[in-house]
Amino acid sequence: MKYGAIYTTYGLVFGPMNAFASQLTDRRVRQLFWCLFSPQLAQVNNTASFSLTLNPDLEHWFLALEQDSQPLYRYLEQRNHRLLGSYFECLWQFFFEFNPDWQLLAHNVQVIENKRTLGELDILASHQQTGATHLELAVKFYLQHPLHDGSLSRHWLGPQCRDRLDIKLGRLNDKQFPFLRHPAAMNTLMERQLPVPNQQNLALKGYLFHQWKNPFTLPLEVNKQCLMGQWLHQSNIKQLVKGHEKWLVIEKPQWLGAVISSSAPQNPLLSASQAASTVQQHFLQSLHRHALMLVKMQNKNGGFIESERFLIVKDDWPSS
């Protein structure tokens, strides 16, 4: 399926849940909602995507958490979530532990044999109706390689070029999901008195970024409703911001979910010239010059909310 250069996906839009999501003003509650209900990024063979139904009970649970988010904040403060992936996992763990329909049986279950770690099971959870589930979690941000049209999963690279979409999907297919049936994994479950899950699911969330102003094709494995942005080199920043006066640079973990200006008070809105200067200074002064997430903000009901997002990389990307 081919898309034109202007194709973007507004970060908060994930189907009919948008109207409900707009009621959630607490930043971390919104991020939890995004983790659960944003579109799946891609599929793997013979493994279903994890899916929840936003029923009245779950809506009530989220609204109660919105009114009193301290349990969520305390839970996160007690855990190591410095990295974006760890934060993503902690949000999922909180949901399974505190939602009344689920029981968190275990998380990050390490399987060790002869003092060697063979692998890990991300989540074991049990639902009162469907039983035990093994869930693998991942949040990823991949950029279209500028020399390819994007039609193959190997055309999509991580910002630091150490990861690729095809590598991640291959690892899930060939190692992570089959690993549950490894004898050492089965022994670990037995030793910890954990049930053998009767199903396995994947929660692979995130964004794909196609090259700015260029057409692209999505791989067959990718969900055609996945969230998307655009990427561009730092030298194009003035062209990008020209004509729009409200921008926001966001750091992790704000990459999870749509941004509203009140949810990121530590990040002031920037004019076009300020946004260009901020990006240029980052790539001049930063030692590692990591990619910057730049969000285009639009006025809505007297505030500002995300409309598009752009990942800015240094000019030698991806050769670096």
Image (cartoon, rainbow, N blue to C red):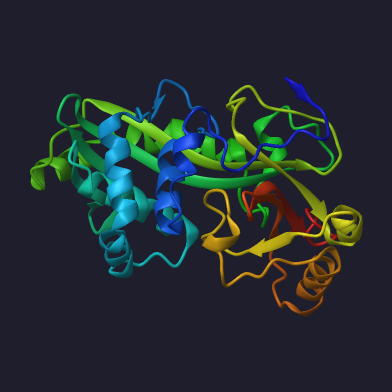
Which percent across, then down, holds residue 225?
60, 27
In the image shown, does 145 or 16 lie closer to the viewer?
16
In the image shown, does 36 or 64 lie closer to the viewer?
64
In the image shown, does 249 or 58 lie closer to the viewer?
58
Quarter holding residue 8:
top right
Q: Which quadrant holds the N terminus?
A: top right
Res. 6 in view: yes
Residue at x-position 31% and y-position 55%: 67
In the image shown, does 76 or 64 lie closer to the viewer?
64
For residue 128, above or below residue 125: above
Quarter holding residue 220:
top right
Which percent across, then down, holds residue 294?
71, 58
Q: Is residue 9 left or right of residue 111?
A: right
Which percent across, then down, holds residue 29?
39, 53
Q: Which quadrant holds the C terminus?
A: bottom right
Residue at x-position 22% and y-position 43%: 99
Res. 122 in view: no
Which percent across, then down, holds residue 79?
31, 66
Residue at x-position 74% and y-position 60%: 247
Residue at x-position 67% and y-position 54%: 159
Q: Is residue 215 left or right of residue 195?
A: right
For residue 134, above or below residue 29: above
Q: Is residue 266 left or right of residue 152?
A: left
